[in-house]
């Protein structure tokens, strides 16, 4: 298990703890784990949790400014902010990795009904890997040696983060995201790229 995987497991445990404690408003405590990231003065991190009803929903992180007296935990704020436009990132491999962990939060946090299409399985606990956990992919047998480790490559003011995941609608995917460090401490994100290592579609619609 490398340092990126260890940080990811710590991050997932913290997210689980935050979801269980729904009474809190700001979830700035996430930065206790993501210690290479920070927000500008007077900004806070919020969490919108998936709601029942409609065709389904996902959960996601956002930023808001000030105390926001109309903020209700689990609801969409009147003036939410894309966290990836304001978060300050330490220009290191670990800083890039921690921002990637925030990017994939929606695929880790709770979903309802059709929101489940965004769910993914990551392989951060390689030491205890016992195969794909999907309820659909019982016929898929992928050894841990076939699954790349997550990595971050640094060069000329940018980072390329690569991480594998399993999706019941795509299969085993190696996702790569390019992060370009800006002079103000924020990061410019380039579109995802990568490839499917093992193609699979469960054929289920819900």
Image: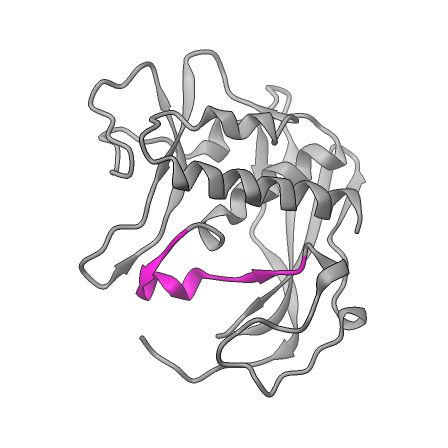
Q: Position of 111 compared to 96: left or right?
A: left
Residue 51 image offset from top left, x and y in percent:
25, 51
Viewport quadrant of the C terminus: bottom left
Q: Is residue 136 visible?
A: yes
Start and end of the magenta stretch? 110-123
Residue nearest the viewer, comparing 105 with 14: 14
Q: Considering only vertical position in the picture, is 94 above or below 41? A: below
Q: Nearer the viewer, residue 129 or 202?
A: 129
Q: How many callouts does the rendering have?
A: 0
As for residue 99 lying within the magenta part, the answer is no
Residue 108 x, y percent position in the rendering: 49, 52
Task: Measuring from the top left, give residue 117's x and y in whole percent.
Answer: 40, 66
Extreme residue toward the top, this view: 41
Which residue lies at the image location 77% right of the left edge and 72% below the top edge?
146
| Residue at image point 31% right, 66% down | 114
Query: Residue, x 72% and y 62% (percent of image)?
Result: 128
Report which quarter residue 63 is drawn in. top left
* Residue 131 location (% of width, % of height): 66, 73
In the visual, does 201 lie left or right of 36? left
User: Going by the image, does 185 lie left or right of 50?
Assistant: right
Please determine whether, in this image, residue 12 is positioned above or below residue 194: above
Can residue 179 be seen at all in this image of the molecule? no
Going by the picture, which residue comes out furthest to the bottom?
139
Residue 98 occupies quadrant = top right
Q: Nearer the viewer, residue 43 or 32?
A: 32
Residue at image point 39% right, 34% down: 62
Q: How is the image coloured?
A: one colour
Q: Is residue 113 magenta?
A: yes
């Amino acid at each position: 298990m490398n340092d990126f995987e260890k940080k990811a497991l710590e991050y997932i445990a913290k997210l689980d703890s935050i979801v269980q404690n729904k009474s809190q408003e700001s979830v700035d405590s996430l930065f206790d784990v993501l210690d290479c990231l920070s927000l500008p003065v007077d900004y806070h991190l919020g969490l919108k949790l998936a709601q029942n009803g409609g065709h389904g929903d996902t959960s996601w992180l956002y930023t808001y400014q000030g105390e926001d007296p109309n903020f209700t935990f689990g609801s969409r704020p009147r003036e939410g902010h894309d966290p990836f436009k304001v978060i300050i990132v330490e220009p290191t491999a670990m800083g890039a990795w921690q921002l990637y962990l925030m990017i994939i939060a929606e695929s880790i946090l709770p979903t309802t009904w059709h929101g489940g299409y965004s769910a993914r399985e990551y392989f951060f606990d390689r030491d205890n890997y016992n195969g794909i956990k999907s309820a659909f992919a019982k016929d898929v047998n992928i050894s841990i040696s076939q699954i790349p480790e997550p990595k971050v490559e640094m060069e000329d003011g940018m980072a390329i983060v690569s991480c594998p995941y399993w999706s019941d609608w795509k299969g085993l995917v190696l996702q790569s995201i390019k992060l370009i460090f800006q002079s103000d401490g924020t990061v410019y994100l380039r579109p995802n790229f990568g490839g499917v290592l093992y193609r699979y579609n469960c054929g289920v619609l819900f």
